[in-house]
Image (cartoon, rainbow, N blue to C red):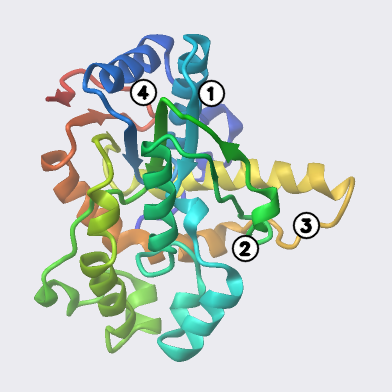
Amino acid sequence: MSPRLHPSASSPAVASPGFAPWLVEQVLDDALAHGSRIHAIAGLQGSGKSTLAAQVATLARGRGLRVAVLSIDDFYLGRRQRLQLGHQVHPLLATRGPPGTHDVALACATLDALREGKPVRLPRFDKLADTRLPPSRWPWAREVDLALFEGWFLKTPAQATDELREPINAVERDEDPDGGWRRYCNEALARDYPPLWSRLDRLLFLQPPGFEAVPQWRWQQEQALASQARARRAHQAPARQAMSEAALQRFVQLFERVSRQALRRLPGIAEWTLPLDARRLPLTGSGQR
């Protein structure tokens, strides 16, 4: 059964303001010590990976390094492409996020340019508008020393076919009864993403205490999006309002299968696994190699 949002999850007091300076410094030093050009940070929804990447980038720039920060979310297919997938393959593919809804070729080309020090525009996705920004609005990156690439399922391997048979939540049971959507996502994960994973020099996995933390953490993210929407409304109406708790509960279920696979497999794949408690505070005994 999928975890439910806890009433206290909507309280701003439980949101993490960021990671401690000692950890930020340790992450940057780890990347530099191992010669990472493309340093990856993985973590399930709401784990703080975007916050940590931004903090590491700020510290690196303070040391005189040229840094680019990007997310696998920036490579979502646009709304029109996903609607086409939803029509041709399965309606659930119209929703961004799961494997099969990213432009992997663009991600590979962008990381290759960053590694080679070539000028490249960094794609950006507007989550409120639910589509990628036009290329004219993508920022340039030039002669980058370090690229920080974050995402919720980086280097997660596909499941065995027999593991897909039984639905694990209400979305799979009610909206994917024949398993066509989860098979498509799993096949995409096995076929399309390994070339992207091969471009990541080193991976830090922010390990939550369990999948049960994800809906609460993701709700806190949605509250931040709601604040952005209110700020934008002063100038122009946003294309999408922040999700309700019910809508978010369904949304999280779209990620649950691959998230649980990441929880099982990434501690054995990532070069550094950092366990977090329910408040996103690092626990002792992290695995680093």
Front position among marks 2 and 1: 2
Mark 4–mark 1 Cα distance, whole angstroms, equals 11 Å
Looking at the rendering, in which quadrant would you find the C terminus? top left
- Left or right side of 97 for 40: left
Front position among marks 3 and 1: 3
Q: Residue at x 41, y 53 (%)?
A: 109
- Image disc number at residue 281: 4
- Image disc number at residue 238: 3
Q: Check disc 4 and give the amino acid type.
A: Leu
Front position among marks 3 and 2: 2
Q: Secondary structure at mark 1?
A: loop
Q: Of callouts 4 and 3, which one flags the residue occurring earlier in the amino acid sequence?
A: 3
Q: Secondary structure at mark 3?
A: loop
Front position among marks 4 and 3: 3
Image height check: is 179 above or below 106?
A: below
Q: Looking at the image, which is closer to me, 175 or 95?
A: 95
Image coords of residue 90 (percent x, y): 42, 85
Report whether residue 1 is seen.
Answer: no
- Left or right side of 98 for 206: left
Q: Of callouts 4 and 2, which one flags the residue occurring earlier in the amino acid sequence?
A: 2
- For disc 2, the marked residue is 131
Q: Check disc 2 and give the amino acid type.
A: Thr
Q: Looking at the image, which is closer to me, 228 or 246?
A: 228
